Amino acid sequence: MLKGKTALVTGSTSGIGLGIARSLAQAGCNLVINGLGNAEEIETIRSELAQSSGVEVLFDGANMMEPEQISHMVERTNQHFGGIDVLVNNAGIQYVSPVEEFPIEKWDAIIAINLSSSFHTIRAAIPSMKKRGFGRIINLASAHALVASPYKSAYVAAKHGLAGLTKTVALEVAENGITVNAVCPGYVLTPLVEKQIPDTAHARGISEEEVVRDVLLAAQSTKQFVTVEQISGLVIFLCSQSAASITGALLPIDGGWTAH
Ligand code: NAD
């Protein structure tokens, strides 16, 4: 379906981003993957993605806290593949703490990685999308772009900001064949969530089992984690021609969480 197109997925060395990269490769998209981690492990991921799908896959290690590195990554992708058709802004981190104890450097890092990096990729990618008259920008927001939870001030602020960025850019490029949407998952069992279970247990003074049952899945009415495959399926649909009129949308995929 996306044969010959090019996708750039930030934060795609793990979790949801890696799952989305895998689905885009299977749909025929050439890829630039990005993220932090061990160089050998990343090379294994890159070559496995390329071999299993027959597409070209490059890795770019741009740090999403560094605007210059981000715009160079977009430039290199444009030069190598002649443009970006699908931009998935997925890189993200989490930190859980009461606001009065929230470390300032964690606030700054979450705003930079979870919000500002998307501004920088979008800003750099739009001119070539406009020239080609086609683009799909998909921002990995969260149910936390729609509702809040305590102890996640930076994350909730960044994701609400990403929702605003999504709607604004969608309006600006609506006549250029470019759609801009935010996917808003509930809890998915990835390294990002696994890491916050002990921190949440500590912040709330409860056990890790209680965190999963009474905090993470409390509002998720299905009582099931959302899966990476379900999110990838939505992303692939948003890339299709059938989704050409879906733009500026914040799409919950959260087991009923935000229906409350
Ligand atoms: P993850 O920790 O498994 O993956 C995060 C990815 O971002 C990794 O590839 C990591 O290397 C990359 N990354 C982190 N900091 C970076 C930086 N400075 N520069 C470049 N790359 C960086 O997390 P995940 O659960 O797969 O989360 C992916 C996205 O989905 C995030 O934006 C997250 O907020 C969002 N999300 C996750 C959940 C969930 O329950 N897991 C729910 C809703 C939204």
Image (cartoon, rainbow, N blue to C red):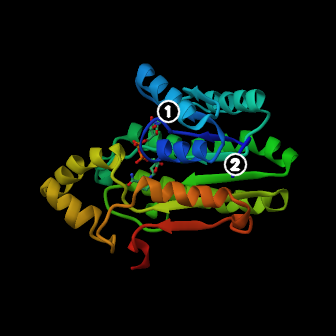
Q: Which residue is mark 1?
A: 35
Report if the CB atoms under discs 1 and 2 are less than 8 Å apart. no
Q: For the residue marked with disc 2, what is the amino acid?
A: Leu
Instruction: Characterize the local packing of mark 1: few (<14), some (14-19) or many (20 or more) Cα atoms within 10 angstroms.
Output: many
Q: Determine whether, in the image, residue 208 is placed left or right of residue 134.
A: left
Which residue is drawn at the image coordinates 50% and 53% (left, top)? 158
The image shows residue 30, relative to residue 143, as above or below, that is: above
- Quadrant of the rendering where the C terminus is positioned: bottom left
The image shows residue 94, relative to residue 44, as above or below, that is: below
Is the distance from the Cβ of mark 1 to the nearest ligand 1 atom less than 8 Å? yes
Which residue is drawn at the image coordinates 28% and 66% (left, top)? 217
- In x, y percent, where is residue 55? 64, 34
Count of marks, rendered view: 2
- In x, y percent, where is residue 131? 87, 45
The image shows residue 217, relative to residue 50, as above or below, that is: below
Q: For the residue marked with disc 1, what is the amino acid?
A: Gly
Q: Which residue is mark 2?
A: 2
Helix, strand or loop at disc 2?
loop
Which residue is drawn at the image coordinates 43% and 78% (left, top)? 259
Label placed on residue 88 = none
